């Protein structure tokens, strides 16, 4: 099975609120490609919805390591930090997400 097929199954499991299945499938997808950003995004959200906040934070940090310019990674990390009560860290990541989004908008408006 390909990483994309596993990812699609994970998305379906997530949509059906089968969080443990989704987490397992996202992880299997990541075994095939540890840098698969879409699977990291999905895994982070599934872990967050399963109230596994420390794992969600670690997943978002991994995503940002791979792609520091991904606004969604910073937005997710901000949300996860907020759920942990880490307001200062959440605000920092939220601001980073805004700046990256603005930069993307500026780049796309120049083309």
Image (spheres, rainbow, N blue to C red):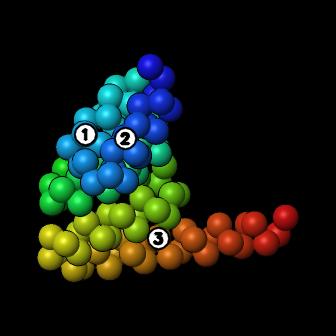
Instruction: Look at mark 2 in the image and give the residue it sits on.
Output: 10
Which numbered disc, 1 or 2, marks the residue that appears first in the sequence? Answer: 2
Rendering coords of residue 90 (x, y %)? 28, 74
Q: CA distance from mark 1 to mark 2?
A: 7 Å
Is residue 37 positioned above or below 47 on the image?
Answer: above
Q: CA distance from mark 3 to mark 1?
A: 29 Å
10 Å crowding of disc 3: few (<14), some (14-19), many (20+): many
* Circles 3 and 2 in contact, beta carbons < 8 Å: no
Q: Which mark is residue 97?
A: 3
Which dot marks residue 44? none
Left or right, residue 53 beside residue 37: left
What separation in Å lies between label 3 and label 2 (alpha carbons)? 26 Å
Q: Residues within 10 Å of mark 2 (few under 14, many from 20)?
A: many
- Provide residue 32's location: percent of width, then percent of height: 40, 23
* Residue that lies at the very extreme toward the front in this rendered image: 16
Q: Residue at left 40%, top 45%?
A: 12
Mark 1, Cα crowd under 10 Å, few <14 / some 14-19 / many 20+, is: some
Disc 3 versus disc 1: nearer the observer: 1
Side (left or right) of 85 relative to 29: left
Q: Is residue 99 left or right of residue 80?
A: right
Visible residue check, residue 36: yes
**Which residue is disc 1 drawn over?**
21
């Amino acid at each position: 099975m390909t990483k994309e097929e596993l990812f699609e199954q994970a998305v379906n499991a997530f949509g059906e609120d089968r969080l443990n299945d989704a987490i397992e499938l996202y992880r299997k997808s990541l075994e095939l490609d540890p840098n698969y950003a879409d699977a990291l995004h999905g895994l982070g959200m599934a872990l967050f919805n399963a109230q596994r906040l420390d794992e969600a934070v670690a997943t978002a940090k991994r995503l940002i390591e791979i792609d520091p310019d991904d606004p969604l990674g910073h937005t997710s990390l901000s949300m996860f930090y907020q759920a942990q009560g880490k307001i200062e860290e959440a605000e920092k990541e939220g601001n980073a997400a805004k700046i990256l989004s603005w930069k993307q908008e500026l780049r796309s408006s120049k083309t």
